[in-house]
Image (tube, rainbow, N blue to C red):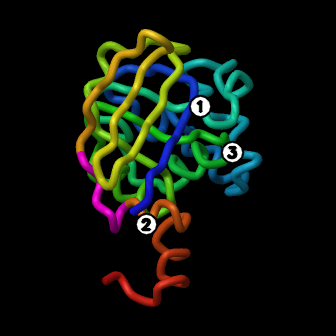
Amino acid sequence: MSERLVEGRARVLGDDINTDYLISSSRKKESLDPAVLRLYLLEDLDPAFAASVRQGDILVAGRNFGCGSAMEVAVTVLLGAGIGAVIAKSFSRTYWRNAINNGLLVIVADTSQIVEGDPLKLQFSGVQPELQVGLAPSRRIACEPVSDFMLAMQEAGGLVPYLRQHRTLA
């Protein structure tokens, strides 16, 4: 796996951000178009949030990100909004899987020292990401490794595009 860099502005959330906070389940009845869904990102927590998101922003959260129902639209809304990655202390198992399957980069790290608006650089050297927070002087935060396979699947855009390219999971 080659060197890789993801840069963006921290958008900090708390613990237990459930899928209905990310996008109200009623919104998926209106449309599944990511360009439409992005307008409703986190609307129940902060009605102005979606309009404030910039391409490449990185969501930063505490524990249990993506808990709640297993709706894939909770990943689609982040992709549609241009979120570059989600970094959290932990993820619900279902959300983690949906994110990987749909090409959203999810990273586990201690996010307790990251504040709203911090510039973030997520740099990969092989499977070991390192998070740089802030400008000079910057802080470095260790992240849990991400397998080559998971990175390849994410770079392909998710499971289905990966299978179209490689014709196998091996």
Q: Residue at x 47, y 15 (%)?
A: 134
Residue 6 location, x and y as percent?
A: 52, 40
The residue wearing badge 2 is 152
Crowding at mark 2 (Cα within 10 Å: few <14, some 14-19, many 20+): some
Q: Earlier in the sequence, mark 1 or mark 3?
A: 3
Viewer-nearest of discs 3 and 2: 2
Q: CA distance from mark 1 to mark 2?
A: 21 Å
Q: Which percent across, then down, holds residue 75?
A: 51, 50
State whether residue 118 is above or below residue 87. above
* SS at mark 2 in the image: helix
> For residue 15, which quarter of the picture?
top left
Q: Amino acid at mark 1?
A: Asp
Q: Is residue 81 above or below residue 136?
A: below
Question: Which quadrant would the C terminus be assigned to in this image?
Answer: bottom left
Q: Nearer the viewer, residue 113 or 121?
A: 121
Q: Which numbered disc, 1 or 2, marks the residue closer to the eye?
A: 2
Q: Which residues are magenta?
A: 145-150
Disc 1 from disc 3: Cα separation: 17 Å
Which residue is more in the foreground, 52 or 110?
Answer: 110
**Element carrying mark 1:** loop
Q: Is residue 148 magenta?
A: yes
Could you tell me which residue is drawn at 46 percent across and 20 percent down? Answer: 12
Sequence-wise, which precedes: disc 1 or disc 2? 1
Which mark, residue 57? 1
Q: Amino acid at mark 3?
A: Leu
Q: Residue at x 58, y 39 (%)?
A: 83
Residue at which label 3 appears: 37
Comparing 154 with 17, the one in front is 154
> Element at badge 3?
helix
